[in-house]
Every structure is written in C-alpha cells, then in structure tokens.
Image (cartoon, helix red, strand yellow):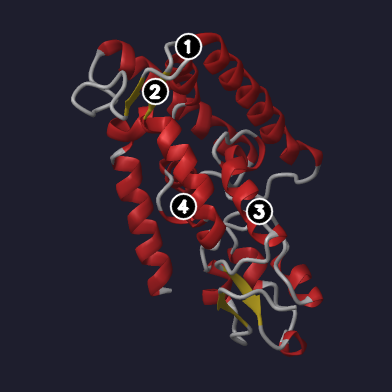
Amino acid sequence: MKRQNIRKLWMIISLLLFPVTLYYFSPALIINGAVNGIINGSFIVFALMLILSVPFGRIFCSYLCPAGGLQECAFMINDKRPKQGWKNNIKYVIWGIWIIAVTVCYIHSGEIIAVDFFYETENGISVSSIQSYIIYYGIVCLILIPSVLFGKRVFCHYFCWMAPFMILGMKIRNILHLPGLHIKVNQKENCVSCHQCSKACPMCIDVAGQVKIGKIRSAECMQCGACIDNCPKKILSYGMKRSK
C-alpha cells in the first residue's frame, strides 16, 4: 500500500498547486491563443500528454492530475460507482468539437506568430486576480460537484478534455505495436474472484472481469496500481511489453 500512499501524496501536491497550474490545462486558453496565432502553455502541455502517453499511458491521471486529486478527495463524500456506457463517450464529443474549434482558429489567424508558454499568466501563476479566482472556483465546482453527486471520478469518465489525448496516445502505441506501461495479468487461473481489484480501482473498472480474459483492456485504466496492490494472489503487475 506504500505505493498508493505515495500516489495520493503526489495528487494532493498537484491539487495544492492547481491555482498556479490551472491555465496550463485550459482548453479555452488554447482557443484564445489560436485566435491570436500563439502557441501557449496548455497547448504544449496537451501535446506532451499525447506524446508521453505512448510509453506511459494515463499515469498522469493517477499521479499528477489536480482534477483527479480533487475527485479522490470527494471519495470521502460519495464513493459509489458511476454508471458506465454511452456516457463515457461524452468526453470524446467535447474533445472533438474543441479540436475542430482550435484548428479553425489557427487557420483563421493565418500564421503562428509566437510561442508563449506563460501566455495570460502573471509571472507564470494562473490565479493572480479577482477574475482568475472566479474562473478557478468555477472549474473546481465543475469538477467537484459531479463527483459528489454521482460518484467516483465521474468527471474523468464523462467530461475530461485531457483524457482523450492520452487515450489516443495509447491507441497509437497499440497500432504501432510499441511497448508501454500497462497492468499485466499473470496466471489468471490463480484468481479466486475476490473482486478486491475491482473494489480498489478508483476508475471503477471491472478489473476482475478483465482478469478472466487475461488482459486489462479498458481505456479508462490509468495505471495507478491499486488493483496490483490489493490482489491477494499477486497475479497483477506492471508490464511494458504487451503479451501476444
């Protein structure tokens, strides 16, 4: 369980730093920069998410995402499993519309005139004025309220505009047959169907059901390792090379 304590510590740190980092995760700021022909910090951060997800999957979501840290704090209020299914596709619709909007704005601007990582920030700090505080608390409510009302990491499942970048990176990895971090199933016949792995999963994945088929295939898996740490038979582990 030591690994999970370290993971949660990193998430608390990322949450505490959210007033500083907020604008580096802003889809609206990318559109604003695109209109003016500027590549800003959030554009660079999202590009890095896509690139780094090829070898590391969605580990950002489990260790460094401030929105994830905020939602896991909400587990103390509501830890029920949100409904899965078609609602998980809402985030892809939001992401697709946003990508189109960004592309149109860059085309309309005519050219990229600058790369400014600290665009629209005050000395690199996002929340530095009354207006930015209003935006900050609005985003906090947007993330926290659905989690309190509907359950574990529901914002990640339904609305997150960052997750599709990492899911796309993992799909690129699979298409190109590249190695990458994933949860590996070892000797599935030793599974005793205790479902401790599924209960521990902060993303509410049916890990036990996927163990039976020998692979953790869910795009919602963020490689947090909770299932590994809670398996009494130790049949789950981290791997880099996909089994054939």
- Numbered circle sitting on residue 60: 4
Q: Which residue is mark 2?
A: 137
Amino acid type shown at disc 3: Ile
Q: Position of residue 105 (x, y in %)?
A: 55, 14
Which numbered disc, 2 or 3, marks the residue that appears first in the sequence? 2
Q: Position of residue 196 (x, y in %)?
A: 64, 72
Answer left or right for 187 relative to 132: right
Looking at the image, residue 141 lies above or below residue 108: below
Discs 2, 3 touching: Cβ within 8 Å: no
- The front one of 166 and 76 is 166
| Mark-to-mark CA distance, 1 and 3 | 29 Å
Which numbered disc, 4 or 2, marks the residue that appears first in the sequence? 4
Q: Which residue is mark 1?
A: 35
- The front one of 179 and 229 is 179
Looking at the image, residue 164 lies above or below residue 128: below
Which residue is at 57% across, 76% downward?
A: 239
Q: How crowded is the residue under tag 4: few (<14 C-alpha within 10 Å), some, or many (20+)? A: many
Which residue is at 66% across, 53% downward?
A: 172
Discs 1, 3 touching: Cβ within 8 Å: no
Which numbered disc, 1 or 2, marks the residue that appears first in the sequence? 1
Q: How crowded is the residue under tag 1: few (<14 C-alpha within 10 Å), some, or many (20+)? A: many
- Numbered circle sitting on residue 172: 3
| Mark-to-mark CA distance, 4 and 2 | 22 Å
| Mark-to-mark CA distance, 1 and 4 | 28 Å
Could one spot residue 220 in this view of the protein?
no
